[in-house]
Amino acid sequence: MSTVDKSARRRWWALALIAAAQFMVIMDTSIIGVALPRIQEDLGFSQENLSWVFNAYVVAFGGLLLLGGKLSDLLGARRMFATGWLVLLVGSVVAGAAGEIWVELLGRAVQGAGAALIAPSALTLLMMLFGSEPAQLGKALAVYGAAAPAGGTAGVFLGGVITEYLSWPWVFYINVPIAVIELIAIPALMPAGAAQRGSTDLLGAITVTAGLAVAVYAIVRAPEAGWASAETIVGLILAVVLLGAFLVVQAKRKAPLVRLGIFRTPQLGAANIAQLLLGGAWIPMWFFLNLYLQQVLGLGAFASGSALLPMTTAIMVLMVVVAPRLTARFGVKSMVVTGLVVLAAGLGWLALVRPDGNYWADVLPASLVAATGMALAFIPSLGTAISSARPEEGGLASGIVNTSYQIGSALGLAAMTALAASYGAGQLSDVTALTNGVSAAFVGAAGIAVAGALIAAGTLRGRRAAAATAEREPAKV
């Protein structure tokens, strides 16, 4: 085998590690769902506090992503990728071995911190490996993108299997062998890259992390505490103050955590808005579809995970095979707008679910339409958000786009949870009321997707406009 062939094979094996990282980061948000009742029983969680087994991960993940992206640029993507896996491994062991509530929440937060280091460095490594070849980059992004829905569905499926046949700690311990394999393979497969000079801007890191964490905390608490409650209002005001302080710090620093000028990069801001609204529509759909399958149609954990496999398979095939070719032919703007419209159509169809419905008529066809929309919009918007930045800011761009998607997911899920509850989704004993709440959530998510399509149509540039801008404008420094 020639040196070129060996190099190409090594690069695709490296992509497998990167895709596995995306798979695990998303899976860790979904795998605990089925195990929560067992965790509640063993550790003594109250019903009100049980959601924090999920939220502790999301708050740490969303709050630390920008810092993770900056550290990836400053200290090297490979180093931070490996560090993230080590942190995730430690958090998984702590969460699995926990015998008290506070230990469980600490372990979940440490898992989220590890994921916040892994996600942006993984995208930076992907760009280092494939960024010089647009055709190969499209395929690599498709594989990476397909790993996200696969991880979400696998989490539900594996969570049910593990909880039923093993015990709940194994939903955390499953990360350990994968992390060990990654840590062993990283030095041989991942490009080293070069660290950069500069400071970590600790004040900026503290204010943005605290601001995002408080915002996510307030949002995920709002359905329980009330959107108009003092807790929610004070939390959101504090988040705005902290994020405002972050912007002031960034404007005055010579070496800021986030160079604010990056948002003037053509396409980057628009692509991040598309990712934010895509997460805001997709994650509520996934959450409430699981709710409908299990609590209305009466499917068990194993059957519910199996029911989502066609949707996951469709996304993976479309992202890997179809979306890159269509993007090359029609351009990013057309694909993102079309994808969001198709996603909205699928969500609108899902809103027609019935209390006495069945999987084949009420779920399967509509979920496949929604999956098609997700597949068409995700890869073009993700690739644009990353590739629009300067090469030395790849980690920062990755952190920003991951933050956009995660914050959009948290906002969308919290808002749709409140909407569903107002239509009766909290009445688990009343199947009709529960279905009405689920239907309302699907309608609301469809509205988010429509808003995303309209904003993308107005802000993303067409191929000709982007090319003309590139010719007129020199690279910004």
Image: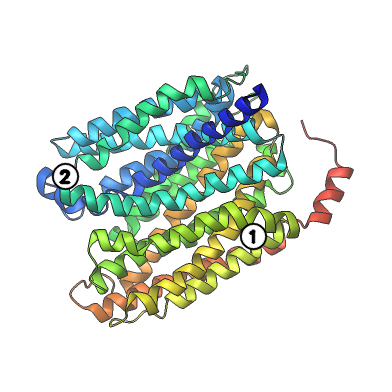
The x and y percentages for residue 443 are 45, 74
Q: Is residue 456 above or below residue 42?
A: below
Three-letter amino acid code of the residue under disc 2: Leu
The x and y percentages for residue 332 are 70, 55
Q: Which of the two residues, 276 or 118, is positioned nearer the viewer here?
A: 118
301 on left or right of 127:
left
Q: Earlier in the sequence, mark 2 or mark 1?
A: 2
Q: Which of the two residues, 216 or 11, is positioned nearer the viewer here?
A: 11
User: Which quadrant would the N terminus be assigned to in this image?
Assistant: top right
What residue lies at 77% left-to-right and 58% top-to-bottom? 462
Q: Which of the two residues, 301 or 121, is positioned nearer the viewer here?
A: 301
What residue is shown with label 2?
166
Q: Is residue 19 above or below residue 348?
A: above
Residue 234 seen anywhere in this rendered image of the structure: no
In the picture, the disc for residue 336 is 1
What residue lies at 30% left-to-right and 31% top-to-bottom? 176
Disc 1 crowd rating (10 Å Cα; few below 14, some 14-19, many 20+) is many
- CA–CA distance between discs 2 and 1? 42 Å
Instruction: Determine contact: label 2, label 1, CB under 8 Å.
Output: no
In the picture, the disc for residue 355 is none
What residue lies at 49% left-to-right and 40% top-to-bottom? 19
Residue 87 sits in which quadrant?
top left
Camera-nearest label, 2 or 1: 2
Q: Is residue 233 above or below residue 192?
A: below
The x and y percentages for residue 69 are 54, 32
SS of the residue under disc 1 = helix
Q: Which of the two residues, 105 or 38, is positioned nearer the viewer here?
A: 38
SS of the residue under disc 2 = loop
The x and y percentages for residue 74 are 57, 22
Q: Is residue 475 above or below residue 465?
A: above
